[in-house]
């Protein structure tokens, strides 16, 4: 199409110009568009080149990936072949196992099993396949007619029990099958929680064990039968239904029952009735109690009783429960034992009768001995009293003769007479002590005693005797309170110190104490000749002296005998240490008391002041013995004392009332050495005339007399009277000015 065809000449110039402008614009656009298309083509060319490079690279990668894929496919195919081979090998291997085998994964899903697995269980094998759950497997087994369930157990019960055991890591159990066959099932958990189940037919093993057990039971039965037949006891064995299942031949002979009555299955009641016809129960057990024991539910305690046959035989019957509710009864013939026991009882009765008769004879002899001993003690006491009275009077008379007007020869003779009388006094006192200790009735009064006071009193009494021999007597003070009898302790120490003074010729005597633990050790040291070793065991014997040729002034050897007996009576340990030529130490240990409970007998006496004169004192003397009264009065009058002497308390009260004079002191002798009567007399006079200082003159050496006098506020002066002790008392009395 040309331009001329586009312009209509008929159009106006303006119209034609408009058309020309439109055509021109279109041509310009076309030219511009042509330029633009050439640029896009070049860009497309560039992109094609780049795309070709990319495609080429991707192609190479794809070829490489394809090569790897082919290699992987080859390896996978090889692995599959290997796995298939391994699976076939595993299947072949488990097929060669003689037992049934199955493997379940951790989710209890069957992985594989061999052909023998559950082959003995009817109806299970056709349904066994991989993928079956353990619960399905157990359910199939529980419904199988081959499974022989225990009595009272249903299939569901068996499933519950089997599932419960499946939870254990290791399980082994036997399953009873029909036809008396047995299958052993073993479960084992692997480390990755898979479950391996093995099934083994153990029928032959169980049958063999059963046969072996039966054979052993037969052997045991034969052994038990032989044992029962060879023991001397009769034995019966009953089962849980109280039926006889075993016995020996001895039981029939023992019970005099027919052996035919002992048969398997015999009822206990039947045999017990037959037994009652032949024997009699001895021990108080009633037949009903025995039957109740047999019928008792639960555990039965052992039962024992005795029966006696008509012929006199005695049987000990012992029944013992067994775990299966059965029981065993044994019969032991104890006739010989019972006869021996009866003979023993008869002999014992005879012996007891003889012992009683002998005891009666001994009691009579003992009573005679005690009467003789008491008579001896009374005789010794009476004889001593009769001797002490004139002895005391003689001492007092001799003491009253001692003055400066006598010639030296007379003074020497008088001194020896006084010494001899003192020795006789000590011997009589020792005889009294020995007599009382040997009687076995010496009373002991234990109390808290001030040891220091006893030592001070003994020092005051014995120091003059020591000084007379030129010896130094040193007694160290003590503050100890001891648990003992004051009278006996005083007598012990008096004998020990007196012996030391008697046998020591020169030097000194030392008395000391030391506390050791819960006791006080009292020691008496001397510088005497010592005791030879051969004599150390003999010094405690009566009438034994180391020097038998010594004069009687050294006593009869009773002092240490008294010490030993008194220490044994008080349970005080004593002993000695000695060195010949150097001296001896006697010691005893007395227990301490924790609480101070002082004996009133040990109250301190008032010590007289030095230089106090007795002249002008008025003393009331009450003494039933006339000779003793005159001797005492003569002695005190020589000291310047005015004596009012009477024979009784009645005369004393009458005299004092008549002269209306209160004496400065009183000396009261007890009537017939009755210290209780003497104390009563003192109490009566004091009640009438006031608290006059007083001493009781007595030969009573009972241990309690000192305490009784102290409780009454009265000093004690033992017969025979010691002039020095009497003088000590009178010097302590103050005369009113």
Image: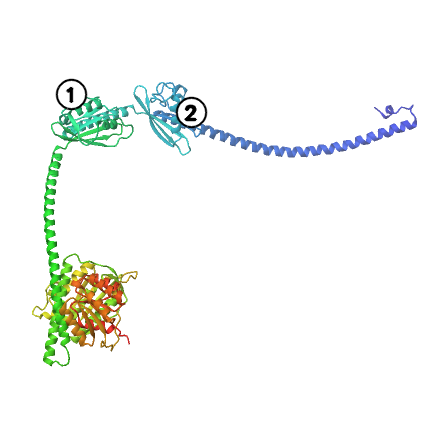
Question: Which residue is at a point 84% across and 30% down the rendered structure image?
Answer: 24
**Residue count near mark 1 (Cα–Cα under 10 Å), binned few <14, some 14–19, many ≥20:** few
The answer to whether residue 562 shows anywhere in this view is yes
- The picture quadrant where one finds residue 703 is bottom left
- The picture quadrant where one finds residue 677 is bottom left
For mark 1, give the secondary structure. Answer: helix
Tell me the distance, in whole angstroms, between the alpha carbons under discs 2 and 1.
60 Å
- The picture quadrant where one finds residue 511 is bottom left
The answer to whether residue 509 shows anywhere in this view is no
Expressed as whole percent of the image width and height from the top left, the position of residue 68 reads: 51, 32
Residue marked by disc 2: 135
For mark 2, give the secondary structure. Answer: helix
Q: Nearer the viewer, residue 516 or 447?
A: 447
Position of residue 550 in the picture relative to residue 734 (left or right) = left
Expressed as whole percent of the image width and height from the top left, the position of residue 23 reads: 84, 28
Residue marked by disc 1: 260
Question: Which residue is at a point 9% across and 80% down the rendered structure image?
Answer: 409
Position of residue 231 in the picture relative to residue 72 (left or right) = left
Q: Nearer the viewer, residue 178 or 597?
A: 597
2 or 1: tag closer to the N-terminus: 2
Quarter of the figure that contains the C terminus: bottom left
Expressed as whole percent of the image width and height from the top left, the position of residue 257 reads: 15, 23
Position of residue 723 in the picture relative to residue 40 (left or right) = left
Q: Nearer the viewer, residue 12 or 685?
A: 685
């Amino acid at each position: 199409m040309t331009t001329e065809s586009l312009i209509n000449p008929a159009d106006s110039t303006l119209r034609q110009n408009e058309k020309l402008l439109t055509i021109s614009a279109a041509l310009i656009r076309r030219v511009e568009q042509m330029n633009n298309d050439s640029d896009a083509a070049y860009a497309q060319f560039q992109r094609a080149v780049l795309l070709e490079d990319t495609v080429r690279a991707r192609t190479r990668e794809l070829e490489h990936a394809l090569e790897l894929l082919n290699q992987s496919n080859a390896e996978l195919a090889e692995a599959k072949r290997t796995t298939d081979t391994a699976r076939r090998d595993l299947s072949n291997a488990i097929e060669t196992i003689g037992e049934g085998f199955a493997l379940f994964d951790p989710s209890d899903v069957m992985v594989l099993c061999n052909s023998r697995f559950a082959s003995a269980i009817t109806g299970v094998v056709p349904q066994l396949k991989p993928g079956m759950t353990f619960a399905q497997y157990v359910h199939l087994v529980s419904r199988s007619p081959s499974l022989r369930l225990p009595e009272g157990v249903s299939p569901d019960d068996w499933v519950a029990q089997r599932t419960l055991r499946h939870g254990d890591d290791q399980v082994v159990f036997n399953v009873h099958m029909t036809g008396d066959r047995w299958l052993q099932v073993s479960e084992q958990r692997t480390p990755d929680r898979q479950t391996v189940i093995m099934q083994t037919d153990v029928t032959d093993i169980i049958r063999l064990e059963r046969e072996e057990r039966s054979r052993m039971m037969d052997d045991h039965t034969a052994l038990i039968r032989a044992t029962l037949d060879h023991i001397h006891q009769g034995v019966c064995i009953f089962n849980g239904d109280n039926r006889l299942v075993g016995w020996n031949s001895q039981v029939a002979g023992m019970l005099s029952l027919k052996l035919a009555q002992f048969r398997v299955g015999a009822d206990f009641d039947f045999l017990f009735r037959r037994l009652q016809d032949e024997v009699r129960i001895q021990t108080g057990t009633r037949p009903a109690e025995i039957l109740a024991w047999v019928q008792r539910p639960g555990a039965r305690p052992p039962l024992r009783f005795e029966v006696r046959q008509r012929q006199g035989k005695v049987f000990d019957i012992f029944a013992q429960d067994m775990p299966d509710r059965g029981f065993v009864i044994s019969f032991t013939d104890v006739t010989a034992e019972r006869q021996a026991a009866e003979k023993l009882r008869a002999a014992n009765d005879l012996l007891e009768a003889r012992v009683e008769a002998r005891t009666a004879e001994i009691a009579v002899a003992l009573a005679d001995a005690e009467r003789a001993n008491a008579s001896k003690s009374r005789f010794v006491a009476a004889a001593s009293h009769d001797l002490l009275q004139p002895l005391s009077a003689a001492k007092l008379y001799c003491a009253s003769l001692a003055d400066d007007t006598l010639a030296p020869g007379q003074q020497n003779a008088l001194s020896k007479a006084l010494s001899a009388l003192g020795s006789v006094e000590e011997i009589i006192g020792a005889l009294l002590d020995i007599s009382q200790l040997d009687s076995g009735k010496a009373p002991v009064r234990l109390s808290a005693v001030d040891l220091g006071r006893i030592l001070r009193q003994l020092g005051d009494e014995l120091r003059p005797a020591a000084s007379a021999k030129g010896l130094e007597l040193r007694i160290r003070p003590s503050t100890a309170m001891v648990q003992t009898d004051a009278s006996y302790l005083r007598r012990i120490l008096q004998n020990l110190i007196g012996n030391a003074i008697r046998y020591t010729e020169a030097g000194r005597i030392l008395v000391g104490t030391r506390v050791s633990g819960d006791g006080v050790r009292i020691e008496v040291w001397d510088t005497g000749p010592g005791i030879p070793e051969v004599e150390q065991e003999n010094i405690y014997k009566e009438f034994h002296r180391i020097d038998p040729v010594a004069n009687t002034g050294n006593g009869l050897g009773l002092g240490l005998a008294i010490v030993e007996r008194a220490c044994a009576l008080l349970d005080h340990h004593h002993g000695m240490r000695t060195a010949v030529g150097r001296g001896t130490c006697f010691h005893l240990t007395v227990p301490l008391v924790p609480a101070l409970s002082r004996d009133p007998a040990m109250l301190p006496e008032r010590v007289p002041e030095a230089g106090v004169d007795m002249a002008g004192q008025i003393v009331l003397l009450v003494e039933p013995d006339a000779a003793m009264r005159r001797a005492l009065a003569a002695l005190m009058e020589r000291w310047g004392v005015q004596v009012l002497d009477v024979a009784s308390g009645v005369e004393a009260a009458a005299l004092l009332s008549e002269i209306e004079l209160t004496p400065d002191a009183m000396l009261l002798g007890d009537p017939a050495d009755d210290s209780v009567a003497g104390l009563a007399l003192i109490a009566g006079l004091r009640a009438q005339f006031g608290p006059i200082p007083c001493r009781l003159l007595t030969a009573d050496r009972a241990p309690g007399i000192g305490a009784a006098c102290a409780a009454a506020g009265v000093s004690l002066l033992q017969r025979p009277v010691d002039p020095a002790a009497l003088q000590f008392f009178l010097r302590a009395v103050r005369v009113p000015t």
